[in-house]
Image (cartoon, helix red, strand yellow):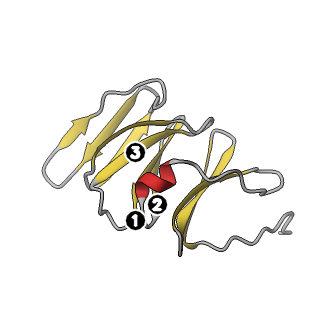
Amino acid sequence: GRTLVTRHVDIKHADVAAAEGTIWLTGDTPQGAVVRTLDPGTLQPGPELDIATVLGRSAEIAAIGSGSIWLDDAYDSSGRIWCVDAAAGPVGPSWATADQVASGTGSAFLFDSTSVRTLPLVAECAG
């Protein structure tokens, strides 16, 4: 097929995901972690989101839920995972990380090699 829009992004280790009508882009630059949204029609980048500073050197998309996007620091130096509202961008709570996270409307779960944990959700993290 044809390419409709192309935009150069100078980000290493980039992850991209679409959720709630927004394109999410994470990764790293020499200055540190990158977390931003892209307009789906123009691919114009939005402002850098504050969560990038918390994530440190690099950010990655751990999972996409129903209305939420789950981010962690790609080098796992923080040992935490953050839930972000996929449509508006407010950062919800964070939890100690596990091997995987999965979520859907109204529920979220962390998995590791020996257990599954149910997470309490709030308005900024609907699952």
Cα distance, mark 3 to mark 2? 11 Å
Is the C-beta separation of discs 2 and 1 under 8 Å? yes
Q: What residue type is labelled 3?
A: Trp
Q: Residue 97, percent across and down?
A: 27, 51
Cα distance, mark 2 to mark 1? 5 Å
- Judge from the rendering whether residue 64 lies leftward or rightward of residue 82; answer left or right: right
- Judge from the rendering whether residue 90 lies leftward or rightward of residue 99; answer left or right: right
Q: Residue at x 37, y 27 (%)?
A: 121
Label placed on residue 60: 2
Q: Nearer the viewer, residue 48 or 17?
A: 48
Q: Residue at x 83, y 55 (%)?
A: 42
Considering every residue shown, the one lying at the far left of the view is 114
Q: Which mark sits nearer the N-terminus, 3 or 1?
A: 1
Q: For the residue carrying disc 2, how many other residues have a C-alpha within 10 Å: few (<14), some (14-19), or many (20+)? A: many
Q: What residue type is labelled 1?
A: Ala
33 lies above or below 30 = above
Q: Residue 11, percent across and down?
A: 60, 72
Q: Which mark sits nearer the N-terminus, 2 or 1?
A: 2
Q: Which amino acid does label 2 sit on?
A: Glu
Label placed on residue 74: 1
* Res 101 visible: yes
Which image quarter: residue 55? bottom left
Circle 3 is placed at which residue position? 82
Q: Residue 1, percent across and down?
A: 83, 69
